[in-house]
Image (spheres, rainbow, N blue to C red):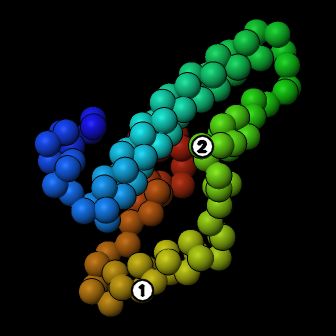
Amino acid sequence: MQNGVDAVSFWDMTFKEILAAIEGAQKRKREELQHQALIAYQQSYLIADLVGIMFGSKQKPPRIYEAFPGIFSEMPRQQDWRVMKARIEEYAAERRKRGEQQHGDDAGRTADPNHV
């Protein structure tokens, strides 16, 4: 057999070990297929964007789970903004509790854009 199990050690394996080796090989193959699909998808997405820009098309390319339905079974889930807001607020409260200073994007800037 390939993928790390030679013919001599195969005959010394139990049924469960053989199943585990087969499942491991299938998982590695699926992960490699997903990796190749991601590369192909990204390339097609970039090509579609460039061609669309050239011809003024507003059509969007298919999502990865639509382009490769057998490989990517789940649709990616977008995280709820309320969860992100709660996490940011927890982080800010923890920083205030430790006494760290807050610095926003406007820290150290003046209101007058012409001020040097």
Instruction: Look at the image and tell me whether residue 63 can be seen.
Output: no
Q: Position of residue 52 (x, y in %)?
A: 77, 17
- At 42% across and 46% down in the image, what residue appears? 26
Q: Nearer the viewer, residue 114 or 106?
A: 106
Q: Position of residue 109 (x, y in %)?
A: 44, 54
Q: State which mark lies toward you, 1 or 2.
A: 2
Q: Which residue is mark 1?
A: 93
- At 62% across and 66% down in the image, what residue appears? 79
Picture quadrant where residue 104 is located: bottom left
Q: Which residue is mark 2?
A: 71
Q: Nearer the viewer, residue 98 or 54?
A: 54
Q: Is residue 110 left or right of residue 85?
A: left
List the single residue furthest toward the bottom. 97
Tell me which amino acid carries mark 1: Ala
Q: Does residue 59 lie above or below 68 as drawn?
A: above
Q: Quadrant of the N terminus?
A: top left
Question: The residue tagged with tag 2: helix, strand or loop?
Answer: loop
Tell me which amino acid carries mark 2: Ile
Q: Is residue 19 left or right of residue 64?
A: left
Question: The residue tagged with tag 1: helix, strand or loop?
Answer: helix
Q: Does residue 47 lie above or below 28 as drawn?
A: above
